Image (tube, rainbow, N blue to C red):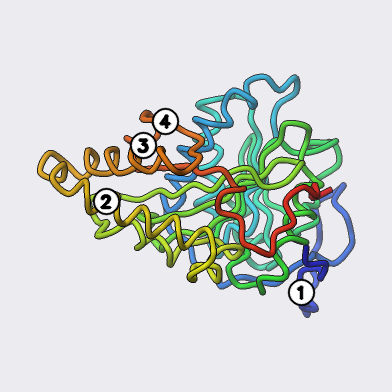
Amino acid sequence: MPSRAPSSRPERTRSSRPEGTRSARPEGTITRGTTNPNRLRRMDRWITAVHGPALRRSPAPPSAVDLGYGAAPWTAVELLERLRKVRADARVYGVEIDPGRVAAARAYEREGLAFVRGGFEIPLPSGAGAPGVALIRAANVLRQYAEDDVAPAWARLCARLAPGGLLVEGTCDEIGRRHVWIALGPEGPRTVTFAARLATLSTPSDLAERLPKALIHRNVPGEPVHAFLQDFDRAWATAAPYGALSARQRWVRAVRALSETWPLADGPRRWRQGEVTVRWEALAPLWWAAPAPLR
């Protein structure tokens, strides 16, 4: 497993921190900050469906982190709204390295929503989510890093999870039509989910350009993710007659065929949402040392 820590760029601008947060320099680098309202709706829909039961079981108000929310706070605001449909006392913390982005986001703070400056260390105010957070969502963050930086970043983030917590890390297009994410627990990666607005999808392999950093350079012959996408395209082509009914029916039929040879972690209810979730071990890159936990 790679051992190099995530790269860090010195910050030239210092900002005041909320009372109770750590004073260390944030870990990581500033992202481009591209964001749009409703961009992460597919990821959030999956989170509330799959992780909702764990959030409801939490004995304390669950805390969630929107890591690297970008130049505008829309995704953090939306995450709070969506999580509160599952758990009314959920709290969300938007975490950003750029102090200017944090200062601008403060105008959107409300009960249950706060913004703090930080990075992979997740510097929440004292008492917020200790001994860990229930959810960390890191969308379009690791895409700018080197492949060798992924495993150390995952380890750093998973170390901040509460027992039963979830890290969701992935990449999507600018308006959220195509999205691929990896779900991890304190023990390491669990699943990979592919999600799309089916009416705009030509072939399932169109999603390859949105693979997370751990997989995007592995879409080459000999790697499992490449084999999966090739099989998916073949199943999609075979299911073409169902396209006369709807793109959804074609997708469901193709995914059902995939389930005969690939270990899927979901069923028709999620497939009808334009999703398919695969066990991590089936798609893990060849360099991955599977048994070792991340912390």
Query: Which dot marks residue 22?
Result: none
Question: Where is mark 2, residue-wise?
Answer: 236
Crowding around mark 4 (Cα neighbors within 10 Å: few <14, some 14 to 19, many 20+) is some
Indicate which label's residue lies in the foreground, 2 or 1. Answer: 2
Q: CA distance from mark 3 to mark 4?
A: 6 Å
Q: Amino acid at mark 3?
A: Trp
Question: Where is mark 3, residue-wise?
Answer: 271
Residue 29 coordinates in the image, percent (x, y)? 70, 72
> Looking at the image, is mark 4 or mark 2 earlier in the sequence?
2
Residue 40 coordinates in the image, percent (x, y)? 46, 50
Question: Quadrant where the N terminus lies?
Answer: bottom right
Q: Is residue 12 left or right of residue 269?
A: right
Element under label 1?
loop
Q: Amino acid at mark 4?
A: Gly
Question: Where is mark 4, residue-wise?
Answer: 267
The residue lying at 71 percent from left, 23 percent from top is 58
Indicate which label's residue lies in the foreground, 2 or 3. Answer: 2
Q: Are the residues flagged by discs 2 and 3 in contact, CB closer than 8 Å? A: no
Indicate which label's residue lies in the foreground, 4 or 1. Answer: 4
> Looking at the image, is mark 2 or mark 3 earlier in the sequence?
2
Q: CA distance from mark 1 to mark 3?
A: 37 Å
Q: CA distance from mark 2 to mark 3?
A: 13 Å
Q: Are the residues flagged by discs 4 and 1 in contact, CB closer than 8 Å? A: no
Element under label 2?
helix
Task: Decide: is 196 above or below 146.
Answer: above
Question: Where is mark 1, residue-wise?
Answer: 7
Q: Are the residues flagged by discs 3 and 4 in contact, CB closer than 8 Å? A: yes
Task: Decide: is 280 above or below 28.
Answer: above
Q: Amino acid at mark 1?
A: Ser
Q: CA distance from mark 4 to mark 1?
A: 38 Å
Q: Quadrant of residue 172?
A: bottom left
Element under label 4?
loop
